[in-house]
Image: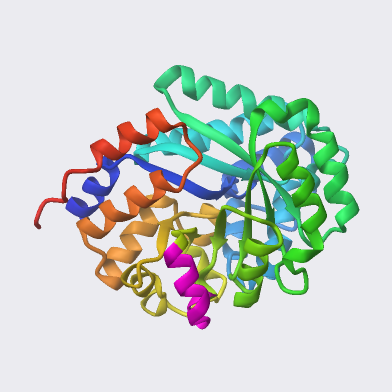
Amino acid sequence: MSEFIDYVRSLPKAELHLHIEGTLEPAMLMSLAEKHQVDLPYSTAADVERAYDFADLQSFLDLYYLGASVLIDAGDFYSLMFRYLERCRDEGIVHTEMMFDPQTHTERGISFHVFMSGFGQAMDEAKRQWGQSSSLIMCFLRHLPEESAFETLKAAEPFKSQIMSVGLDSSELGHPPEKFERVYVAAGEQGYRLVAHAGEEGPPTYIVDALDRLKVERIDHGVRCLEDEELVERLVKAQTPLTVCPLSNVRLRVFETMVEHPIRQMLERGLNVTVNSDDPPYFGGYLLDNFEALHRELGLTMEDARHLAVNSIRSSFIDEVSCKAWLDQLSVPAPTP
């Protein structure tokens, strides 16, 4: 196992499906709660960890939003971001495109300036210290009305240079992509790259609608595409990236066990799959932990891992020069175990 993980660590990789608020570790949550005198229904970090037994996506989101309530000043957002970027350095993640949820903070009276300054300072510092490449994906919360998404898009205008893309997350069921079609048109006209969560809990039609109505370039999750053969053929032909999160899928009961996860089938079908960690502390691990689980439970090989790393770089929004340099490094076949 250590040989496999050491090899995966050595590969230049991109992480494309990571919610920065979802990297809040229990110890940091409790520390910030004490700092800001925020009342939580937990006494210790261990109490928080015991709450990580989710029945579905909504049960996770309830805890996720509670945790985010301790993020209040720019220093909190800096610490959260910098800690994750240090993890990227340690795991060989050369580029990361991180989702953040402005409405989670603005609804609490936290201004864009507060979290964007904290995020930006941490990203700049990581770039300066070890050359970390990173960008931000501003997500709209799909359980909130379209009007709120438009307000968020407007509020982001002074910070547009810091944001690469817009996305769509939160509760999927009952909130189809078309609810946000007009705001996606507006975001596209402003030059943002477009991605969206689809086909996690929602049906394959949500993936189709995200492609056709939101005009996204990348699908976050997308695991339910296998239920629609015509959709699979379309995704394979277009090589539309699917940012799959295996540990998350199991923890949120999309699949009961890792053995049931279809990622190998997706790869065999020729789908452009990447591996990501989603909300690591909540779901049992960061990027290398996901690769380790796939190796242990599904027999993922070193060559599979190299292929997934190639997919991650190809599917990112990084500049062409950096993309080519990392793909050149990944052109050497994996060693035979």
Residue 5 horizontal/vertical position (percent): 25, 51
Extreme residue in the left direction: 336
Residue 164 horizontal/vertical position (percent): 62, 36
Q: Along the line of sight, which residue is nearer the eye, 209 or 279?
A: 209
Please tell me whether residue 320 is drawn above or below residue 314 in the rendered image.
above
Residue at 74% across, 54% down: 65
Residue at 87% across, 58% down: 145
Residue 210 occupies quadrant: bottom right
Residue at 80% across, 46% down: 103
Asked whether 106 falls inside the magenta stretch, the response is: no
Residue 143 occupies quadrant: bottom right
Residue at 56% across, 27% down: 123
Please tell me whether residue 220 is drawn above or below residue 309 in the rendered image.
below
Q: Majority secondary structure of the magenta segment? A: helix
Q: How many marks?
A: 0
Residue 295 horizontal/vertical position (percent): 27, 64
Magenta stretch bounds: 225-237
